Amino acid sequence: MAEDYAPCDSINDSLNMKEGANDLLVVCFGEMLIDFVPPVCGVSLAEAPSFKTAAGGAPANVAVGISRLGGSSAFIGKLGDDDFGHMLSDILKQNKVDNSGVRFDSTARTALAFITLRDDGEREFLFFRHPSADMLLQESELDINLLEQARIFHYGSISLISEPCRSSHIAAMRIAKKSGSILSYDPNLRLALWSSAEAAREGIMSIWDQADVIKISEEEITFLTGCDDHTDDKVVLDKLFHPNLKLLIVTEGAKGCRYYTKVALLIIATCI
């Protein structure tokens, strides 16, 4: 089984190679938004009796999670110059996340998302970002110093959907990689935000071969490979494991996760 293989030493080697920072700084890039969540589960958005606000956005959640676990993290992204945007920036600061890379836009609002958990266990999303401030981050607004300090640079795919944020995302990856950062990618598929399934697949895969670490879900394996059997190691390795990848993690819900390394690739190839 893939999860039985030893962790990849090359990740530790990469972390040890980069100098000039006292902490292992993880810089997270992308969207941060307001989630509106009903106080009860098992209802559709239309049936929800009310909603509570919560901070959301996968890259920002990672930054907060790292900080709460005692790590050092920062967030780079753009928020609306509105009450919600400043509230989110304050939440980062309250959680000891470096928010010096946050920018504010006076022409667009902070993104909103209404989310509920239905009886069938599926989440239902309704997004309001037409456009939202996170989509308007300019390359000139990137905090170069923060990117150069990153030991790990973490990002998703939502920031690849439209310009100018897409170009800013790619530029940030380039700066971080040149500075010796490990690139960490969580596609975090949100199909409703893309113009089509094909656009989502192409967008997600457009930067796939640059990542050192990738985290995907079983649903994303099916979406990206076209194979219904997301447990097929050969399909995962043949279609998703690229030559420069150090670690591929597949989340399995309540069961935890499994992972693949180059060692796994060699062992499975030998057994076939």
Image (cartoon, grey):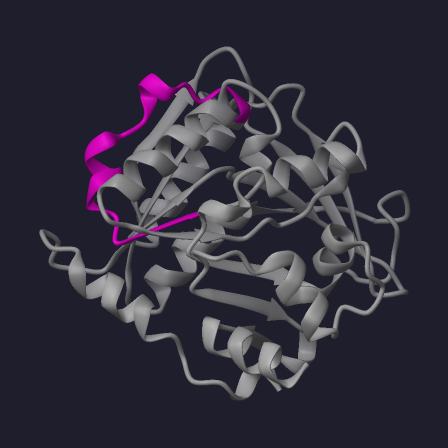
Q: Is residue 257 above or below residue 96?
A: below
Q: Position of residue 151 (x, y in %)?
A: 25, 54
Residue at 87% over, 56% down: 43
The C terminus appears in which quarter of the rendering? bottom right
Residue at 75% over, 41% down: 191
Q: Position of residue 78 (x, y in %)?
A: 44, 28
Q: Quadrant of residue 218?
A: bottom right
Residue at 82% over, 61% down: 227
- On the question of residue 84 being in view, the answer is yes
Residue at 61% over, 80% down: 268
Q: Quadrant of residue 255?
A: bottom right
- Magenta segment: 135-155
Q: Is residue 140 magenta?
A: yes
Q: Position of residue 142 (x, y in %)?
A: 32, 27
Of residues 196 and 110, the one drawn nearer to the viewer in this rendering: 196
Left or right relative to 241: residue 219: right
Of residues 52 and 146, the one drawn nearer to the viewer in this rendering: 146
Q: Is residue 262 above or below residue 150?
A: below
